[in-house]
Image (cartoon, grey):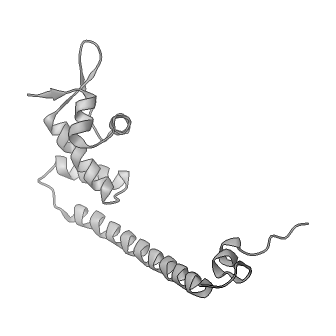
Amino acid sequence: MAEFAIGEAARHSGVKIPTIRYYEQIGLLPAPDRTEGNRRLYDAPTLQRLAFIRHARELGFEIEAIRALLTLQDNPQQSCSLADSIATEHLTQVDQRIASLTALKNELVSMIAQCKHGHVSHCRVIETLSGPPIALS
């Protein structure tokens, strides 16, 4: 079975070396085999696990959700109801972020529209970003 040094594992998986070490430290990856010189060696299943983690992180899943999903992946005979629940909860969080970003976008559009071709002294962008006056005592 092919084994890869950490640099090769990083290139193949798209995960940076410090992140690979971090995933080992927090238990998302098993402790790798080591050479006589104490260099880490990763096998193909570990690279697949790294790719799974990277993809889940790209989709915005939190570490604990990924940990739970990996546990499910390691035990494929289980019901996928927990995976569905994790994905549903994540979807709810994504929907909330979309709503928040939409509100932010609308506020920015409004600020820009109110400020077009005016003077800085009446600029809604500057006014909004300045916030309320600070009370000095």
Residue 97 to residue 44: above or below: below
- The quadrant in which residue 90 appears is bottom left
Residue furthest to the top in view is: 36
Residue at 27 percent of width and 36 percent of height:
10
Front residue of this view, candidates 1 and 134: 134
Residue 17 pos. (x, y %): 34, 34
Q: Which residue is pictured at 23% across the width and 61% down the height?
A: 83
Q: Quadrant of the N terminus?
A: top left
Whether 36 is drawn above or below 8: the answer is: above
> Quadrant location of residue 116?
bottom right
Instruction: Report the residue that reaches farthest toward the front.
Output: 117
Q: How many marks?
A: 0
Say left or right for 32 vs 126.
left
Picture coordinates of residue 14 (x, y %)?
26, 43
Q: Position of residue 126 (x, y in %)?
A: 67, 75
Locate the C terminus by quadrant.
Answer: bottom right
Is residue 115 placed above or below 60 in the rendered structure?
A: below
Pinpoint residue 95: horizontal percent, then vertical percent.
37, 75
- Which residue occupies 20% across, 37% down? 46
Given residues 130 and 47, the one toward you in this image is 130
Judged left or right of residue 107, residue 81 is left
Which residue is pictured at 54% across the width and 81% down the height?
107
Q: Quadrant of residue 99?
A: bottom left
Examine the rendered structure and indicate whether residue 84 appears above or below residue 58: below
- Specify the farthest residue to the right: 137
